[in-house]
């Protein structure tokens, strides 16, 4: 065994000891030994205990640990500390800019147990609340995590939306007369993008191809057939498909839908149109209503397109209000009044649903019963002076381990609506997690089931649930299911929207905003809702102020 793995194991041991607040002297001695072993001019393997203990900075205790490591491949003390530490917490110690002391605060004080949760906390401005952290440290940690995420080759749609559109604009400026459009995952509005596909239709394919190959518009440019491949500065792979103008729409169709969708459409044609003048002609030839790019996953909507019964997909302008938002009363950045005025005057919405955290969410300054009543007084005061706009009294009530909600009934009934969400104990098995959600859904005060699986895209899988049982329970109890519009969540997954709609469940596009800018995430909620086939008649916050007031009254009645 080389010295570096031994030094690495000793270093990890010292970090875990610091994390668990073991004797500081012991921590320093092991950390010092790790440094010394790494720099030794000879390998420690093959050395006897007596030889090792005489090495400067090692001594008897650490010599014994090295011998144990050489003989067994590990150390009992290290394994015991690893067993007492969540795997995600160990991973966090590898992030540049935070050591064991800061990780301990993040873990113990904020209840964060993995990198994904930490990244989400940075974006929600929650880290600056912790002792020893400031805005600068929070930003450095966020950037370090983004760098690690980028190295995996996958990006959230929201992370690369602007850069992708900027690249398309650059291409259009390079080739003014050419046809351009995104294909692939980006055009289908997928929540995760692993490659950006662009179709280019030029009057002279060869000239366009050669010009791109010689350009510096991408890094690491290579050619393969009629494809130009490269990378954007952030590491996202790009594939530009160059064709003659007359072949543009056929190639765009082939490059947009996934393989199953393209095959399902082509199989319906007696013969393929060689040079269609639009994508609409391709679908007409297949006996189908034109399908928006976001619906081109598999054959999910093929039967409806055949019957000319595709939904009129919801648009951003259909939204009349915003529900599930957090103010300075819990872990938000803006006051209720600031958020209300922004929604009314900038976003031109009709209502705002405040849903600060409930009392069990101590890490997010959850509201005690006394503070709930104080907040309600403030909302009553604001509603008297806000003209043509209403603030609804809501709460994001934690779903406790047994499925109950986080306040007694006499407090729950004081709210206009309640978003019930899981924030703790995310490691239940499917049966227990499902039963927990169903009990919360059956609570007569639950209005909306918030981010049903708790997932954080590219960071944390959601807890396992039986989707059908949960959705069926929502249908039976007339509980709305949230499409959490935060681009890290987008939960409920769009793949289950149709099942919910077929069962008669209403969905709600909620930004989970913690600052005014967070309301803009409804854009991403609409995108993912369109992928799932949502239409405004089945979206809670597409109701007008008068309609949603009646909805809440009926639910409480």
Image (cartoon, grey):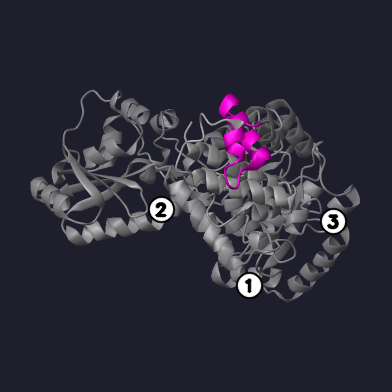
Q: In the image, which disc is placed on residue 341? A: 1
* Count of numbered circles in the view: 3
Q: Examine the rendering and report whether any part of residue 201 can be seen.
A: yes
| 72 falls in the magenta region | yes
Distance from disc 3 to disc 1, alpha carbons, whole Å, reads 24 Å
Mark 2 is surrounded, within 10 Å at the Cα level, by few (under 14), some (14 to 19) or many (20 or more) other residues, namely some
SS state under label 3 = loop
Residue of label 2: 160
The residue lying toward the viewer, choosing from 35 and 319, is 35
Q: Are marks 3 and 1 in contact (CB under 8 Å)?
A: no
Give the label, 1 or 2, closer to the camera.
Answer: 2
Residue of label 3: 414
The image quarter in which residue 61 lies: top right
SS state under label 2 = helix
- Relative to 211, 326 lies left or right: right
The residue lying toward the viewer, choosing from 422 and 438, is 422
The image quarter in which residue 81 lies: top right
For image coordinates 71% across by 45% down, the residue present is: 423
The residue lying toward the viewer, choosing from 198 and 469, is 198
Give the label, 3 or 2, closer to the camera.
Answer: 2
| 235 falls in the magenta region | no
Residue 441 x %, y %: 75, 38
Q: Which residues are magenta?
A: 50-75
- Taking 45 as reference, is 168 above or below it? below
In this view, the residue farthest toward the bottom is 385
Q: Examine the rendering and report whether any part of residue 507 can be seen.
A: no
């Amino acid at each position: 065994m080389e010295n570096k793995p031994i030094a690495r194991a000793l270093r990890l041991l010292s970090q875990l000891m610091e994390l668990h607040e073991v004797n500081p002297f012991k921590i320093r001695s092991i950390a010092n030994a790790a440094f010394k072993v790494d720099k030794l001019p000879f390998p420690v393997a093959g050395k006897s205990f007596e030889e090792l203990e005489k090495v400067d900075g090692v001594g008897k205790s650490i010599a014994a640990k090295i011998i144990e490591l050489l003989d067994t491949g590990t150390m009992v003390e290290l394994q015991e500390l690893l067993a007492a530490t969540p795997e995600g917490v160990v991973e966090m110690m590898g992030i540049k800019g935070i050591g064991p002391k800061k990780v301990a605060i993040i873990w113990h004080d904020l209840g964060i147990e993995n990198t994904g949760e930490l990244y989400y906390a940075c974006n929600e401005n929650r880290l600056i609340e912790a002792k020893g952290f400031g805005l600068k440290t929070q930003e450095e940690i966020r950037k370090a995590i983004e760098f690690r995420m980028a190295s995996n080759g996958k990006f959230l749609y929201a992370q690369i939306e602007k850069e992708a559109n900027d690249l398309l604009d650059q291409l259009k400026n390079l080739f003014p007369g050419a046809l351009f459009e995104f294909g692939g995952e980006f055009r289908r509005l997928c929540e995760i993008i692993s490659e950006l596909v662009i179709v280019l239709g030029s009057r002279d394919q060869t000239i366009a191809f050669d010009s791109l190959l010689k350009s510096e518009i991408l890094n690491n440019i290579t050619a393969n057939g009629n494809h130009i491949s490269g990378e954007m500065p952030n590491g996202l792979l790009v594939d530009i498909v160059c064709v003659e103008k007359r072949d543009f729409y056929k190639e765009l169709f082939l490059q947009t839908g996934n393989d199953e969708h393209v095959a399902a459409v082509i199989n319906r044609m007696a013969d393929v149109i060689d040079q269609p003048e639009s994508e609409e002609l391709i679908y007409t030839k297949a006996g189908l209503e034109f399908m928006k790019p976001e619906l081109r996953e598999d054959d999910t909507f093929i039967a409806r397109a055949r019957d000319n019964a595709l939904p009129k997909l919801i648009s951003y302008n259909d939204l009349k209000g915003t529900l599930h938002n957090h103010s300075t009363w819990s872990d938000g950045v803006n006051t209720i009044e600031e958020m209300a005025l922004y929604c009314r005057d900038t976003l031109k919405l009709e209502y705002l649903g405040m849903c600060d955290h409930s009392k069990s969410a101590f890490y997010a300054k959850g509201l005690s019963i006394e503070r709930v009543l104080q907040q309600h007084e403030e909302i009553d005061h604001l509603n008297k002076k806000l003209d043509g706009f209403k603030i609804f009294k809501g709460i994001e009530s934690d779903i406790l381990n047994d499925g109950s909600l986080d306040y007694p009934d006499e407090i729950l009934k004081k709210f206009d609506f309640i978003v019930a969400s899981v924030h703790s104990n995310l490691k239940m098995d499917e049966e227990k997690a499902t039963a927990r959600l169903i009990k919360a859904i059956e609570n007569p005060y639950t209005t909306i089931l918030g981010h049903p699986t708790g997932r954080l895209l590219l960071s944390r899988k959601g807890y396992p649930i039986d989707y059908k049982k949960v959705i069926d329970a929502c249908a039976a109890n007339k509980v709305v299911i949230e499409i959490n519009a935060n681009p890290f969540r987008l939960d409920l997954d769009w793949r289950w929207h149709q099942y919910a709609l077929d069962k008669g469940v209403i969905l709600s596009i909620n930004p989970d905003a913690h600052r005014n800018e967070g309301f803009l995430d409804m854009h991403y909620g609409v995108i993912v809702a369109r992928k799932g086939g949502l239409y405004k008649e089945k979206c809670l916050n597409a109701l007008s102020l008068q309609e949603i007031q009646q909805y809440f009254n009926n639910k409480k009645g």
